[in-house]
Image (spheres, grey):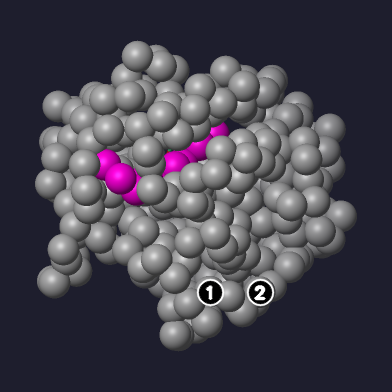
Amino acid sequence: MNNTILITGATGNVGSETLRCLMQRPDRDYRVCVASRNPEKDRQRLPIQPDSFVRFDFEDDQTYAKALRSADRVLLIRPPQLADVDRYFKPLIRVMSNVGTKQVVFLSLQGVENNSLTPHHKIEKLIVDSGIPYTFLRPSFFMQNLSTTHRAEIAERNEIFVPAGDGRTSFVDVADIGEVAAMALTDPTHLNEAYELTGSETLTYSEVADILTDVLGRPIRYTNPSIPAFIWRKRYKENNPLGFTLIMVALYTVARLGKADGVSDTMQRLLGRMPRTFRAFAEANKSVWLR
Ligand SMILES: NC(=O)c1ccc[n+]([C@@H]2O[C@H](COP(=O)([O-])OP(=O)(O)OC[C@H]3O[C@@H](n4cnc5c(N)ncnc54)[C@H](OP(=O)(O)O)[C@@H]3O)[C@@H](O)[C@H]2O)c1
């Protein structure tokens, strides 16, 4: 269908912010369709309603064609638990080609071009090889990891428990990513571009803890666990799946080795303003860490 944007991952971090930006434009000349595993449930859950819903499940290839035919541009967000690119994304991108998708905006990962082991690297390659016009968004570490994945340890134990050592991380706010995604989906000048999206500062987790201490008005500590101590607590004490625990170790080892600190001015150039700082993010979201 012409002039319709399909949003995957609309209930998640970046999808919900993209949906918000797209629906809030007063003079919009496009329609927005949400690709959902459960349209009835998501109609109740989403605070911002799209023009329509279509049933779509990455794990059910029978849902691909109908969903993709309902739009000409797609925001593609890989759910974190789906790492098998050949199984899910290869067929999906083949269907995109078959139905004539005019653009795919893919939520990728900072540094992906040098990391062929990540699913994002393989997905980017499939998209390029398919010939579908694309925009790759390559963000750094989401500030929202502190308000979602690590929310409980901060709210309940006043600690940040990640094995990142003293490495610096360039955090980014998903609201800023959503704004760029909406821009990319509505302005053809972003076709066949790859954008490294970061905030404007790098922080150690001690500095993050200091900011949270200041904003919340109670002491928050960065406990800086060793990798074995982290694995023991996450896997065996809290009973998280091994896969989840190992992915966390891999992500925070990157930070520990000082390789998560790349800062780019692309976000500022695209938005025409500075990206949100971690302090501003913490102040806007402080209620999530209250006990
Ligand atoms: N966290 C970071 O710091 C970071 C940094 C850079 C890149 N990334 C990348 O960002 C991506 C995740 O984005 P996000 O954080 O915005 O997502 P998210 O908040 O984790 O949400 C995942 C979304 O995927 C949907 N989903 C899950 N399984 C599905 C399925 N089988 N079929 C259809 N939809 C399904 C979920 O819908 P339901 O409501 O149905 O569950 C939800 O809307 C990952 O690829 C990650 O690697 C993350």
The amino acid beneath tag 2 is: Ser
Verify whether residue 233 appears in magenta: no
Q: Pinpoint residue 5: horizontal percent, then vertical percent.
A: 28, 49
Q: Which residue is more in the foreground, 89 or 10?
A: 89
**Residue annotated with mark 1:** 267
**202 w.r.t. 235: above or below:** below
Residue at 68% over, 29% down: 245
Disc marking residue 139: none
Q: Is residue 170 visible?
A: yes
Q: Secondary structure at mark 1?
A: helix
Which span is picked out in magenta?
A: 71-80
Residue 264 is tagged as: 2
Residue 114 location, x and y as percent?
A: 80, 51
Q: Quadrant of the N terminus?
A: top left
- Relative to residue 87, is residue 54 drawn left or right? left
> Is residue 79 highlighted in magenta?
yes
Q: Are marks 1 and 2 in contact (CB under 8 Å)?
A: yes
- What's under tag 1, amino acid-wise? Met
Tell me the crowding category of disc 2: few under 14, some 14 to 19, or many 20 or more residues within 10 angstroms, Cα based: some
Label 2 element class: loop
Q: Foreground residue, 138 or 246?
A: 138
